[in-house]
Image: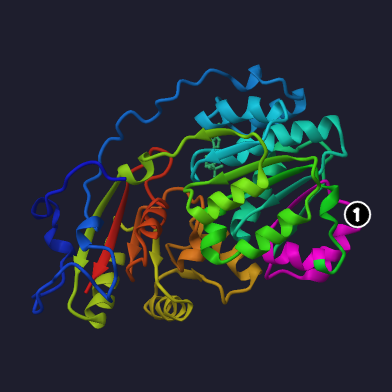
Amino acid sequence: MFQRSYNRGNFHKKRFHGGGNRRSHRGFQHGGNIHSSKYIQKAVTPEIQQEHVIKNRFEDFPIHPQLLQNILTHGYQKPTPIQDRAIPVILTGQDVVGIANTGTGKTAAFLVPLLHKLILDRSEKVLVIVPTRELAVQIDDELRAFAKNISVSSLLCIGGASINNQIMSLRSNPLIIIGTPGRLKDLVNRHFLHLGQFKNIVLDEVDRMVDIGFIQDIRFIISHLPKERQSLFFSATVSPDVDSIIRSFVRNPITISVKIKETVGRVEQDIIKVNNKDEKLQKLIELLRTEEFKKVLIFGRTKWGVERLSKTLLSMGFVVGSIHGNKTQNQRLRVLSQFKNDQLKVLVATDVAARGLDIEDVSHVINFDEPSTYTDYVHRIGRTGRANKEGKALTFVI
Ligand code: AMP
């Protein structure tokens, strides 16, 4: 992904370094498989950001006038490359495989044409399957903005929230369901959700679903879908497992690839060498007290570690929240919205909880614990430097 060569010496900044380095640093930590040199990278002006020339305006798409008005009122002036390419194809009813990551605008790429279909024909029910509860909520928020003055009902079927409430709401026959695989499977098994009714299916962030271990649940869901359907598939990467899902899911798809390099390109990356855990914590506190650390997302490896760190920071007077798998759905959503609205300065998170989140103006991502894979690293640091803003990512290395 990184095409530029780096020169470690140039990028080290004294103020980020811990005290005397007693042990020689060999670049690897915790038996980790990422060399620390990969965490160092100067921010660069993205090379040609969009090779794709945008051909359409939203006004050019044959979509319902109210839907068009809602998109424009929402502040979208012109389609992103994936929207430009996918919306016309989806409107013709074809299956799509989108190789795209978060930040490309893929949500609107599938919501806009599917909402249009629903306006024309209310039997065109939509099922959107996503890896995490937070992503489901994010998609639902965008859906609500696009669905103003259009009477379509949606329901979130996600884990961590009351299944009984979801069962009750399913009785009112929502036209759009956004759910996570485990909960959807549960509802199908209990005969409250009948997948045969859904003619439009979106599988979003499939690589992440596979990472989390949802592959069997996805296979189960696909096996219950009607044969006649429109299938839309999105993933940032295509591993053999992801490929096997594509094969069983779509039919004669159009493949659209718009992976963006720019999110990490504009993130200045550096490491902070420390000798032990105490020094790591001290250094973190020092950084958080620096003025430029305005809105900071910190990643930890385990739920317990994340919780412990957030409590420590809280006790030191920082305005901090945490998200991880042990938090209830409501807690996670509350903390997330506080961080989004700048009511929290620091958010401590695990990888799963933070994947795909779209939060504005994150000034720094700090890897308090190293990520386990380089893909996770790229996802983590992609939470900053968004929407043409600059960001910084720092990784602690012991
Ligand atoms: P997504 O990749 O769908 O998560 O979108 C990433 C971010 O881009 C979100 O904050 C969207 O609200 C925003 N976005 C998506 N499409 C557009 C557009 N056409 N114009 C401006 N912002 C957009």
Q: How many marks?
A: 1
Helix, strand or loop status at disc 1: loop
Quarter of image, ligand 1: top right
Mark 1 Cβ inside 8 Å of ligand 1: no
Please, what is the three-letter code of the amino acid marked with disc 1? Ser
Instruction: Residue 217: name its quadrant.
Output: bottom right
Figure quadrant of the C terminus:
bottom left
Out of 245 and 91, give the one closest to the viewer: 245
Residue 54 appears at what percent x and percent y? 50, 21
Figure quadrant of the N terminus:
top left
Out of 308 and 8, give the one closest to the viewer: 8
157 horizontally vs 382: left or right: right
Magenta-tinted stretch: 159-188
Q: What residue do we see at 61% from left, 35% from top? A: 109
Q: What residue do we see at 68% from left, 66% from top? A: 182
Say if the magenta span includes residue 273: no
346 horizontally vs 326: left or right: left
Q: Is residue 180 visible?
A: no
Q: Which residue is mark 1?
A: 172
Q: Is residue 232 above or below residue 305?
A: above
Q: What residue do we see at 60% from left, 41% from top? A: 107
Q: What residue do we see at 42% from left, 52% from top? A: 383
Q: Is residue 309 above or below residue 373?
A: below
Residue 117 appears at what percent x and percent y? 78, 32
